[in-house]
Amino acid sequence: MATLALGVSHRRATVELLERLAFADADYTKAYRRAVDDPAIDEAVVLSTCNRIEIYGSVPSYHAGFQALKRLLCESREVDAETISEPLYSHYEDDAAAHLFSVSAGLDSMVLGEPQILSQVREALRRSTAEGASGPRLTALFHAAARAGRTVRTDTAVGAAPDAFIAAGADLAAETLGGLEGKHALVVGAGQMSALALKHLRHRGVGTIRVVNRSIARARALAERVGAEYGDLDALADAIADADIVISATGAAGIILTQEALRATMSDRAQPLFVLDLAVPRDVDPAAAAIDRLHLVDIDGLREALEARDAGAAEDISRAHDIVAAEVHRFTLRRRSERLAPLIHALRERGDGTVATELERFRSELSSLTPDERAAVEALARGIVAKLLHDPIVRLKELSTPGTEDAHAKLAAELFGLELPAE
């Protein structure tokens, strides 16, 4: 079996498409049942975040695996193959590992080093395991990817700003509104992103902050931590009317801020309103961007600002890429060692057998040696054989890249007269 990753991400897909492809909690069980029932998929892990939807599979071959994983994605999300054909990408074997390691490290995110992705990678494996869809190959891959992500966060400053989404959006808001000090802010939602927004807005000197959420208890708990006001979604219209900046980051399945409601709000005010929509699926109707004096920025709109911010972190980015490359090399060599372990064991047994045979053949000539002298001769013989086998074994691991590993293993087995281990 081989590892194949197939997906769609923010790099080539629109927010609209990512919204259609995103997995809700209720969608996973059915998708994993499809994966388990597909003879072309041995293992599967679905990674669905606001920036990407990817399926990692243990498959018999690239072509069969690609068709199976693409079919799984299309059928699970009820989209036709043509819709995803242009933004769809795939990574095979070592490239799949390198891609997941970069994702886990936050190097493939819209926001460099975003803090959520590492926990999302872990959660994706946990959910797959609970559904009985993961196995040893993908479990090892995801554990190694999580380790790479942790190392990048420990050894570099990549991901040091956990509120990068909000920071970039707040900078745009400050440019639009002429600063944030003393402004009135509204935060819609009470999750992790909303908590980060509150902290950042308070740090930027915003005057009053109000939190509204479907659960007023959660809104109150969040607001009381920073001395903000709170209310439920019934108070949304009034709260927007008093706000200069709105940050919306709920987990709602559909639009909660419609164009009509925002147009009505803007008709009664002269000052501009900045709306930052951090939700996927989006909370704010994109058509609201056409409303006079309303400035709407969503995930797509943050790309340019975030790329500019990341440009100053070249040294840390380079260091992070080096860490990922080293972790990928470590993982692939270990995986090849495991794949080739029976053959390597057989090679070493052949070497030990040769030493034993030759020592027995020269037993009479060695009979006059003292026990210590005989032990030295035996150690010398074993050391010579071990050294002679060491370089070929190392080269066998290094040369056994995807697509050639079986050929190299078969050649080595034939040269030494050994049986090639089965997959």
Image (cartoon, rainbow, N blue to C red):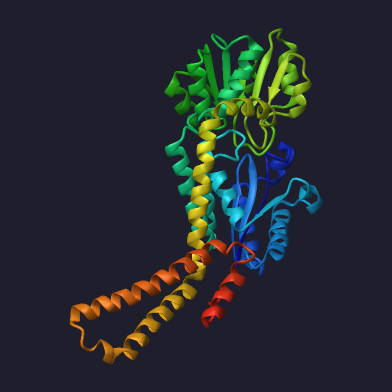
Q: Quadrant of the N terminus?
A: bottom right
Front position in the image: 229 or 401: 401
Measured as percent of width and height from the top left, residue 65 is found at 68, 63
Measured as percent of width and height from the top left, residue 39 is found at 66, 70
Identify the residue at image location x=37%, y=73%: 384
Identify the residue at image location x=61%, y=60%: 57
Measured as percent of width and height from the top left, residue 116 is found at 52, 39
- Position of residue 13 in the picture relative to residue 160 (left or right): right
In the image, residue 138 sits, relative to residue 22, either above or below, namely below
Q: Which residue extends farthest right?
A: 82
In the image, residue 101 sits, relative to residue 262, either above or below, namely below
Front position in the image: 150 or 128: 150
Measured as percent of width and height from the top left, residue 313 is found at 54, 29
- Residue 119: tell me if it is visible: no
- Residue 272: tell me if it is visible: yes
- Position of residue 364 in the picture relative to residue 202 (left or right): left
Front position in the image: 41 or 398: 398
Q: Quadrant of the C terminus?
A: bottom right
In the image, residue 286 sits, relative to residue 357, either above or below, namely above
Identify the residue at image location x=49%, y=48%: 326
Q: For residue 411, which quarter of the picture?
A: bottom right
Front position in the image: 108 or 298: 108
- Position of residue 40 in the picture relative to residue 104 (left or right): right
Identify the residue at image location x=63%, y=36%: 252
